[in-house]
Image (cartoon, rainbow, N blue to C red):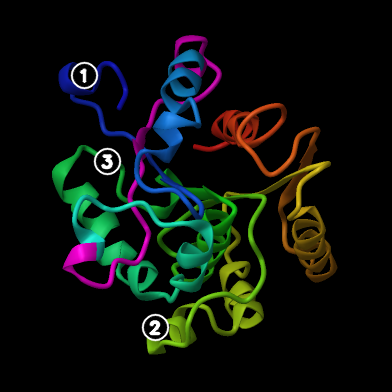
């Protein structure tokens, strides 16, 4: 939250920041240095102040799962990316945030970004809701087909090429792909980058020095770069 939110009366853009497998809503706080990154950029005039929303986008299937938003290991998290949470995201998260906070509630002032599985989810958030999100960021996106079969999965994660064609008829204001030189998802990210290039879809691709991790040219630096470009 910008430091002057409660005194300025201003409306703000919103960045939705998604975690990866093994993560939940505090991942960007515990490991991603999001407070330090945002405050430093804002204080130095390098990025526009915005509201940052870090939701839990794991799928919880019963009361035992949901209790305390329990930790899920990577394998379990990946298999449960089934489109249920993602399909409800605009209604249950975006609309609620707009109703509770002083946001600028339009495509030009909304961004969604995530790491690994969260990057995959962010790509499809933009593709499924092209009128909602104007900026898309995918940090080392986990691009393999994942998740148990589910009717919401078929709806949300089906037909990416056609959805991208619709999305880029009125292109996002910014579309950012990131990977590390030692990243296990580098080849997948570069493959997606080449596809966007062939189609003539405007985007940027940044290769960092690190791997599939937070530091040393990883997701912290990628977030820092993206925040200086959006809004």
User: Disc 1 or 2, which lies upstream in sequence?
Assistant: 1
Q: Do the residues labelled 3 and 1 touch (CB within 8 Å)?
A: no
Looking at the picture, tell me which residue is in the foreground, 15 or 81: 81
The residue that appears at 40% across and 31% down in the rendered structure is: 29
Nearer the observer, disc 2 or disc 3? 2
- Quick one: 43 or 66, which is closer to the camera? 66
Question: Per the image, is 50 magenta?
Answer: yes
Residue beneath label 3, please?
103
* Predominant SS along the magenta part: loop
User: Residue 225: where, in percent of width, then height?
Assistant: 63, 31
Q: Name the residue under label 2.
A: 152
Furthest residue in direction top, as rendered: 44
Disc 1 versus disc 2: distance between alpha carbons? Answer: 41 Å
Residue interval drawn in magenta = 41-64
Question: From what the image shows, is residue 87 above or below residue 49?
Answer: below
Callouts 2 and 3 close, C-beta under 8 Å: no
The CA span between labels 3 and 1 is 13 Å
Lower position in the chain sequence, tag 2 or tag 3: 3
Q: Confirm whether the magenta stretch covers residue 135.
A: no
Q: According to the image, label 1 marks what residue?
A: 8
Q: Can residue 130 be seen in this view?
A: no
Mark with earlier residue (3, 1): 1
Q: Is mark 1 on a helix, strand or loop?
A: helix
Which residue lies at the image location 66% right of the left edge and 66% below the top edge? 143
């Amino acid at each position: 939250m910008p430091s002057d939110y409660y005194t300025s009366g201003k409306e703000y853009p919103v960045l939705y920041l998604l975690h990866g497998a093994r993560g939940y809503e505090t991942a960007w706080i515990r490991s991603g240095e999001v407070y330090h990154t945002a405050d430093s950029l804002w204080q130095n005039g390098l990025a526009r102040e915005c509201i940052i929303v870090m939701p839990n986008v794991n799928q919880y299937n019963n009361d035992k799962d949901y209790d305390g938003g329990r930790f899920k290991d990577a394998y379990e998290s990946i298999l449960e990316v089934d489109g249920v949470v993602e399909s409800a995201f605009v209604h249950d998260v975006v609309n609620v945030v707009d109703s509770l906070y002083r946001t600028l509630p339009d495509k030009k002032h909304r961004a969604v970004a995530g790491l690994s599985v969260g990057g995959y989810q962010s790509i499809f958030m933009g593709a499924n809701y092209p009128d909602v999100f104007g900026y898309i960021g995918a940090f080392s996106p986990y691009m393999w087909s994942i998740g148990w079969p589910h009717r919401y999965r078929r709806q949300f994660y089906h037909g990416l090429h056609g959805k991208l064609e619709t999305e880029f008829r009125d292109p996002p204001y910014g579309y950012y792909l990131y990977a590390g030189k030692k990243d296990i998802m580098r080849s997948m990210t570069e493959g997606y980058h080449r596809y966007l290039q062939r189609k003539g879809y405007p985007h940027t691709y940044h290769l960092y020095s690190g791997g599939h991790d937070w530091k040393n040219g990883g997701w912290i630096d990628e977030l820092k770069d993206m925040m200086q470009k959006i809004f």
